Image (spheres, rainbow, N blue to C red):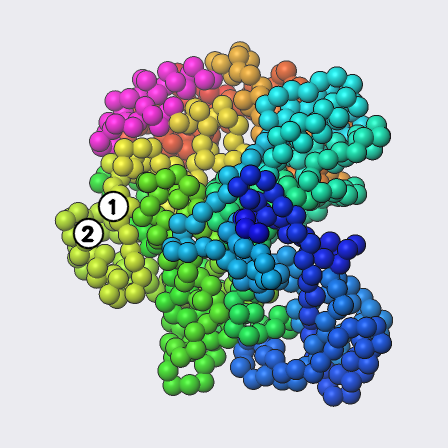
Amino acid sequence: MKGWILDLYPDFDKGKMTVWLRGKKRCYRLKEDYKPTFYVRSDERGLKKIKNYYDKRDFSTNFVKRKTDIYSDREEKILSVTPQDLFDPRDQLDAVRFFEGFERYRFYNVDIPLDQRFLIENEIKPFSLVKKDNGWRSLEVGSDIHYSKPQLRKASLNVEVKSTKFRKKDDDLKAVTFNGQEIVGDETSILKELNDMLEKKDPDIILTSGGNSFDIPYLVRKAGLNGVELKLGREKTFHPPRKGSWYESYGKVIYKPPFYPLKGRIHIDTKNSFLYREGKIDGLIEASRISKVPIQRLSRRSPGSLINAMEVERALKDGYLIPWKKNISEDFKDSIHLLRADRGGHIFEPKVGFHTDVIKLDFASMYPSIINEYNLSPETLGCSCNDHYEVPELGYLVCKRRRGMIPKVVAPLIERRQKYKGLKDKNEFFEKRSKVLKWLLVTCFGYTGYKKARFNSIEVHESITAYGREILVEAAEIAQKMDFEVIHGIVDSLWLKGDREKIPDLLEKVKQKTKLELEYEGIYDWVVFPKNNSDGVGALNHYYGVFEGDIELKGLYAKRSDTPEYFKEVQREILKELRDISKEEDVEQRFEDLMKIIEGKRRELMNREVDPKKLSFTKTSSKRAEDYQHMTEMKSALTQYENIGYARSPGQTVAYVVTDSESSSAEEKVKVMENDPQLYDTSYYVDYLYRVVEEVLAPFENLKMRGGSRYNKTKKFSSKPSKTLKY
């Protein structure tokens, strides 16, 4: 039998692994024997005791020698334990906890997802063309990036309830839109017709927007109440009620909705899938193939977790077992060392003001390239041989002889993305694949220092940034020796002024010195680096200008996700007015036109001519309403959501309009969008307008106000225009 691997998952009831193959005309379901072996390490007495324990329970046990530590190639005697049929090895952890405890025993290969293990051990990939006879055989030939794909049938699914504000699980079902066709009627007939359409269309992929949060659990509940067997999957799928969860990552609180997978079909919640938003189906297929994580589970995973999956595969292929709980602690460091190590990337403070003809250069995948070029991995640090690198500033010794596990993972990703970048103009799916690979490379650095990562090492994390700092400084020094002026530099990018004809020579010299590729990104007709109001130095990651003919923004209101749409439009309109200037003095000539724009927007706000929806703030809550001590906008919004039966968890978004900024009442300070706000606090929004305007115009020293007084950059605009801005 031939086909593409569409999906797979363990069937614990039958003790088999279920594999779905997509043929040219239909899908096939296979039930495969699979007996996942796990391993236990202990002293001689402990090994004999636990062997006796599993022998009595009809497990197959053997003493074997395996590598258990990526820091050593030494094999040691351990116990292999194999079940009679498919089971989840994690189930044994509870049994052993009662048996004697984990202090005496170390477990290996117990928490690797079974679908991933099955793929790795059979040397096959999701969405790869395979043949199944006595075993599994890949039929893919030629270039790994020009792979064949099945003709997938896709369908969208959306649920509409009889509610005027927001959807709740107890609302009556009004309609279901399936693949663009609306199904209406009573609840039972809607559900039955949905089943009929699913059978007729027989989609491989069902796309929802918020399906994990609402659509799927709602339909399952309604089907139960109406006595209808809902057939969302090709195989019967049981969906018990679940709750979402939330966690903190890099200072942000992230909400993770519950997971409602289908069997035999792939459900992708597009609203809650970062990788889908970046790469669509082609990007997900690419990520699934290289990580060995089935696409349905992968669609809700972070890029970093896929790096973790690839590291697990690499370790297994190199003959290492995967410990259940890593036992790697951070080395002790004195305060002086911490000051040197815990510094992040290097930054050249931006030269505040207006600049023309600025060159932008960028190191291609700087941190992943450093990992690859300097062999940075947990097991390569602390080298005792004479053939090593020495990490700048920190003095860590990195082995040159032994290729590290993380470089083995990262190098193919770098090479693969470079190939796709060369092909992206030929077909859009190459660009989608490249975008997903970009995010995998971006996160591979952060995952080296993430405490929950399976192979994390803070020393590796520190080494990467130390090399990064040295490389950026070396590149800037080479540029300055070639008479370039450094306008700004941050982590992996440089902004320079100088002779464009010298750029190719500069790039080559930097590569020879640093071993990394510095790429020419383009030219700014003009760019502005504003300063911080607090200390007057250049603001980091805040700039705007015209880059290669297009307006480019970084860190401004127009780029922030929580800025109301109306003010994004205002800021872009002002920048559009400035687009074709060639020198700072040109801004003063546009003064009248700029003031007309600002005055027109102010009048719109004061006269309440702006649709409140365009003034809505969309923000992510970091805690529960009761955890806020003061009546902030967020507390007001969260309280309203609770009052209308739509409580939001930390990490979920809230949307509201400010109706009375001075109020201490939860019901009056803001109005959440579900309460359909009709009015807004005009003074609050006019003040916000002036802040948006000031962000763009404040850096221009020569901008004059009407009546001859110069633009006052030291005062913030207030809701009373006459104090700061004369019309």
Q: Which residues are magenta?
A: 573-602
Pointer 1 or 2: first along the chain = 1
User: Does residue 504 show up?
Assistant: yes
Residue type at mark 1? Ile
What is the count of numbered marks? 2
Q: How would you rate the neighbour count of disc 1 (Cα within 10 Å): few for under 14, some for 14-19, many for 20 or more?
A: many
CB within 8 Å, label 1 to label 2: yes
Residue at point 59% right, 79% down?
A: 67
Residue at point 50% right, 75% down?
A: 379
Where is residue 566 shown, x and y percent of the image? 49, 23
Where is residue 482 shown, x and y percent of the image? 17, 57
Residue type at mark 2? Ile
Question: What secondary structure predominates along the stretch shown in magenta?
Answer: helix
Where is residue 207 shown, x and y percent of the image? 60, 35
Nearest the camera: 552 or 436?
A: 436
Q: Which mark is residue 359?
A: 1
Q: Quadrant of the C terminus?
A: top left
Instruction: Reply yes or no: does residue 596 show up in magenta.
Output: yes
Q: Circle 1 sits in a helix, a strand or a loop, which is it?
A: strand
Where is residue 551 shown, x and y percent of the image? 33, 33
Nearest the camera: 710 or 355?
A: 355
Farthest bottom residue in view: 44
Residue at point 38% right, 23% down?
A: 573
Q: CA distance from mark 1 to mark 2?
A: 9 Å
Nearest the camera: 10 or 710?
A: 10
Q: How would you rate the neighbour count of disc 2 (Cα within 10 Å): few for under 14, some for 14-19, many for 20 or more?
A: some
Query: Against 441, is 666 above or below?
Result: above
Nearest the camera: 236 or 226?
A: 236
Q: Which mark is residue 503?
A: 2
Residue at point 59% right, 58% down?
A: 133
Query: Against 409, is 319 above or below?
Result: below
- Residue 547: image quadrant is top left
